Image (spheres, rainbow, N blue to C red):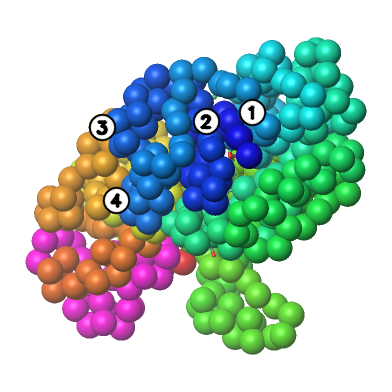
Amino acid sequence: MEICVHGLGYIGLATASLFVHNGHKVIGYDTDDRVRRRLERGEPEVTEEELETYVRDALDGELTISSHPEAADYQLICVPTPYDRDAGRADLQYVEAAARNVRPLLRADDVVVLESTVPPGTTATVLSPILAESGLEPGTDIGLGYVPETMLPGNAVTELQSNDRILGGIDADSTAAIEELYGTVPTGDLRVAPDATTAEFVKLVQNAFRDVNIAYANTLALTARDYGVDVREAIRLANNHPRVDILRPGPGVGGHCLPVDPLFFAERSDETQLVDAARRVNDRMPGYVADLVAEALGTLEDKTVAILGVAYKGNVDDTRNSPGLEIARILSDPETAELRVADGGMGATEIRLCDPHVTSPTLELESLADALDGADAAVLTSAHDEFADLDPRRVGSLLGERVMVDPLALMDADSWEQHGFELVGI
Ligand SMILES: NC(=O)c1ccc[n+]([C@@H]2O[C@H](COP(=O)([O-])OP(=O)(O)OC[C@H]3O[C@@H](n4cnc5c(N)ncnc54)[C@H](O)[C@@H]3O)[C@@H](O)[C@H]2O)c1
Ligand SMILES: CC(=O)N[C@@H]1[C@@H](OP(=O)(O)OP(=O)(O)OC[C@H]2O[C@@H](n3ccc(=O)[nH]c3=O)[C@H](O)[C@@H]2O)O[C@H](CO)[C@@H](O)[C@@H]1O
């Protein structure tokens, strides 16, 4: 089957490659010239090793990069859907633009599939009317539906090929046509939703579930502190119950899915208080960690803090909504520092950032040794494998003061304390 994929970012490129690897011809279109040029040269901007090889193989095969979208049996839309905080809703401009690009290419019986994460109802009420302006009616003349992507950054290829797929068409024929396409690739089970809106809802349900569960763990961390209880030990014990499975507290929830997708629920419902509260709890965590740093140092005035990890989680290079960067921002803001430190530190704290996975041209990152050299405290904010092996002797010889803030509990507390460290956890 011929497929045209709109959007060749993290999801679109992986999806295009998945179909190529399973015998389809895929035309890949991205509005960004730079992205297209790199791909035409066979150089995807992908830092996950396995995914990079997977994409390169597809580019060597039947994945053709085009400067314009082309007619195809299936049009797959994998464009960004950011959250517009001022407007308080999803920004669907990229989905709408892709729909307008698809419109003139449509032929009877073609099928349009949206994979981007969207508020429930988007396929039926936003995408469908734009496509209908072609003169071909979705559900009657062409197929239309929604298939969310659920692969985990850091384990992309495995999950791309093994996760169950939810799919929902706007009518039974659309669903059947979408099932026919996704049935050709090795995934887990195909799970048919009653309609596209349910499939959209389920994607949000999964991410909000995780966000709420992490918020619960973070709430427990804050509460346990008031009772002098070790929260990780408490969660470990609680999780022995057959129906309890609490996640891990940490310095905050980053990435561009978990901090954003739950907000899409609120678009057409006033009943999202629990999900909204979870967002607030998780958003509070970087500030809480910054407070712990200030508390451990007594003052932030003239202090130097090394933030180890600006990626939003371990072993990835994505810095979107990164807790580490947010902690750095809070600590380096003199006004915030003044508010946060009992004896009123006024000078901006010097922040040194280090991350072995991030190669961002816009961030000044230092080597581990430079970041730690003479610093008053280190804060471990991404669970990179490289940090798990940190040697307290080496870190102690570099740091000015032996203060290690470890909100992810990566370090063995006993061993670091034996080396004279004040190890601050949550
Ligand atoms: N990254 C993830 O882990 C993940 C997982 C599941 C779902 N999603 C969802 O998938 C969607 C895409 O996310 P992503 O991470 O791939 O984004 P991305 O920013 O990595 O890539 C999106 C690409 O789409 C291109 N684009 C924008 N408008 C276009 C248009 N009209 N036509 C063609 N190309 C266009 C952009 O230039 C960009 O290269 C989002 O809705 C996201 O929420 C992401
Ligand atoms: C339901 C689900 O699983 N969805 C996944 C999610 O991918 P993700 O990479 O965003 O998810 P996480 O790995 O959970 O990380 C998020 C943040 O939460 C922090 N965290 C995590 C666990 C914990 O116990 N305590 C924490 O504090 C962690 O450090 C990081 O900052 O969304 C993608 C896009 O929709 C999906 O495709 C993908 O399936």
Pair 2/4: label in front: 2
Q: Is residue 288 above or below residue 63?
A: below
Q: Amino acid at mark 3?
A: Pro
Pair 1/4: label in front: 1
- Answer whether residue 412 is magenta in the image: yes
The image's mark for residue 361 is: 3
Which stretch did the figure color magenta? 397-423
The alpha-carbon separation of the residues under discs 3 and 2 comes to 30 Å
The alpha-carbon separation of the residues under discs 1 and 4 comes to 38 Å
The alpha-carbon separation of the residues under discs 4 and 3 comes to 13 Å
Q: Amino acid at mark 2?
A: Ile
Q: Amino acid at mark 4?
A: His
User: Front-most of 400 and 241?
Assistant: 241
- Residue at the (81%, 54%) spot, across then down: 192
Q: Is residue 168 above or below residue 33?
A: below
Q: Amino acid at mark 1?
A: Ala
The image's mark for residue 72 is: 1
